Amino acid sequence: MLTGYDKIKKLPEVQVVMDMDGWGSKVLKRSAYMRYIYKEPVQFTGFKLFYKNDTKTGANQLYTPEEILKLTPKPVYIQYQ
């Protein structure tokens, strides 16, 4: 994970997106988002979903876009891999 978020300099020609990455269940991914992204926002937030690895156990389901957009802060970028 990135540390020193408060030292990132914002530039007008660059938009910084903190993209939550990692495999796992919805509960695990949400708690990581709250632990890292919520506490250390820079400018914009994102959320990454893995078609294969987030659903490996069979019990896990991917977040729907609607579910992700209910997070605080609301991600402006959702990446599917």
Image: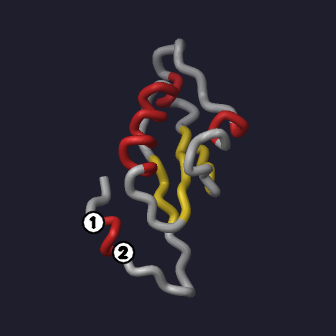
Quadrant of the rendered image containing residue 44 = bottom right
What colour-coding does the image apply?
A: secondary structure
Q: Please identify the residue farthest to the top as the structure is shown.
A: 59
Image quarter (top left, top right, bottom left or bottom right) of the C terminus? top right
Secondary structure at badge 2 equals loop
| Residue found 27% across the figure and 60% down from its top | 3
Label tally: 2
The reply, left or right, for residue 16 in relation to residue 32 is right
Residue 59, horizontal then vertical, whole percent? 53, 13
Residue 78, horizontal then vertical, whole percent? 62, 49
Residue 29, horizontal then vertical, whole percent? 46, 34
The reply to whether discs 2 and 1 touch (Cβ–Cβ < 8 Å) is yes
Q: Amino acid at mark 2?
A: Ile
Q: Which residue is mark 1?
A: 4
Residue 1, horizontal then vertical, whole percent? 30, 52
Q: In the image, is residue 52 above or below residue 14?
A: above
The CA span between labels 2 and 1 is: 7 Å
| Residue found 45% across the figure and 42% down from its top | 33
Which label number is shown at residue 28?
none
Q: Which residue is mark 2?
A: 8
| Residue found 50% across the figure and 70% down from its top | 16
